[in-house]
Image (cartoon, rainbow, N blue to C red):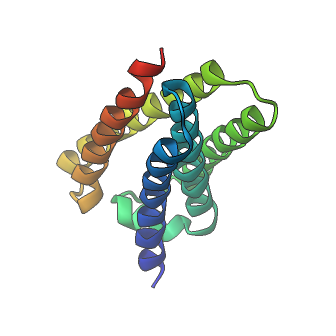
Amino acid sequence: MSTKINRFLEIFRWMGVALGIFLAFYWGNNPQTQFNIFAIFTVVFIAGFTALEGFFFQKSASEVSGYTGGHAYQRQSSLQFLALAATMILALILRWGFYAYLGLIIFMLIFLTLSSINHLYTGFKEKFVLNSILRPILTLFLWVVSLFFIIPAL
């Protein structure tokens, strides 16, 4: 049952990204505004829901990812994601703007890239699960979509 919740959260994260893309085009009237909308939704949904998953569904999150043990590191990673989502919300409230959003999404993309390499390595070395290959593919997709918004906004 718990792994179903993890799968739902994974789908929900990507629905948030899709919503961010839609709203970027619907509300955004220039490339920077479009990027800002996309970045806020993407970071809050991916980082925020990853943090919630790590806090409340640790065991099944490890199972879905193919990892065992490491709860202290998982909690630390969840805190990092929570801090990232909270900082994005704070940046929105305080109107820090484009470069703050850019820095936060680039940080997240770099972290997800390194995490994807770890998923791939773990999949080949220890236990291959769907996330071993899915995580790198989705991270690459997220880079492509992000660059689509970033480049015109610069």
Residue 43 image position (x, y, % from top left): 56, 42
Residue 117's image quarter?
top left
Q: Residue furthest top?
A: 154
Count of residue discs: 0
Residue farthest right in this picture: 94
Closer to us: 137 or 70: 137
Q: Quadrant of the N terminus?
A: bottom left
Q: Residue at x 48, y 55 (%)?
A: 19
Asked whether residue 117 is in view, the answer is: no
Q: From the top left corner, tell me how far across and down residue 102 is, in percent.
A: 55, 24
Name the side, left or right, on which 145 lies relative to 27.
Answer: left
Is residue 131 shown above or below 101? below
- What residue appears at the point 21 percent right and 57 percent down from the top-left corner? 128
The residue drawn where x is 42% and y is 75% is 3
Left or right: 8, with 50 as reference point = left
Residue 139 appears in the rendering = yes
Which residue: 42% across, 38% down? 112
Q: Position of residue 76 (x, y in %)?
A: 62, 44
Tell which residue pokes out farthest to the bottom in this image: 1
Which of the two residues, 89 or 71, is positioned nearer the viewer here? 89
Q: Position of residue 105 (x, y in %)?
A: 52, 31
Establish if 154 lies above or below 48. above
Residue 24 vs 130, above or below: the answer is: above
Instruction: Name the residue nearer the viewer: 14 or 118.
Output: 14
Q: Residue furthest front?
A: 29
